[in-house]
Amino acid sequence: MKYLFTLLISFSLTATFAQTKISGQVVSLTGEPLPLANIILADTYDGTTSGPDGNFEFTTTESGRKTLIVRFI
């Protein structure tokens, strides 16, 4: 039982440290912030929506080079 508990704690700590924070600001060509733009990490379900000032932030467990997709209607 003690071994199982130690193993579970090890896996949960690894998952916590394996997250990457992605943040930034979405702006138009003229430099104005774009609120409510959808920001998605390509080929994943990870993403968010920009706030009223165009800022966004989310965490992902993905690693390596990825494409960030921004959609604004």
Image: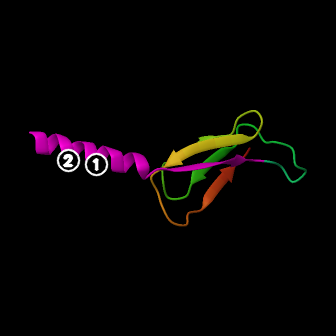
In the rendered image, residue 28, in percent from the top left (x then y), is placed at 83, 49
Which residue carries the number 2 mark? Answer: 7
- Label 2 sits on what residue type? Leu
Q: Is residue 37 left or right of residue 58?
A: right
Q: Which mark is residue 11?
A: 1
Contact check, label 2 and label 1, Cβ < 8 Å = yes
The color scheme shown is rainbow
Q: Is residue 39 left or right of residue 25?
A: left
Q: Quadrant of the C terminus?
A: top right
In the rendered image, residue 43, in percent from the top left (x then y), is placed at 50, 58
Q: Which residues are magenta?
A: 1-26
The one of 68 and 13 positioned closer to us in this rendering? 13
Residue at 86 percent across and 44 percent down: it is 32
Q: Secondary structure at mark 1?
A: helix
The answer to whether any part of residue 63 appears in the image is: yes
Asked if 69 appears above or below 55 in the picture, the reply is below
Residue most extreme to the bottom: 65
Residue at 57 percent across and 43 percent down: it is 58
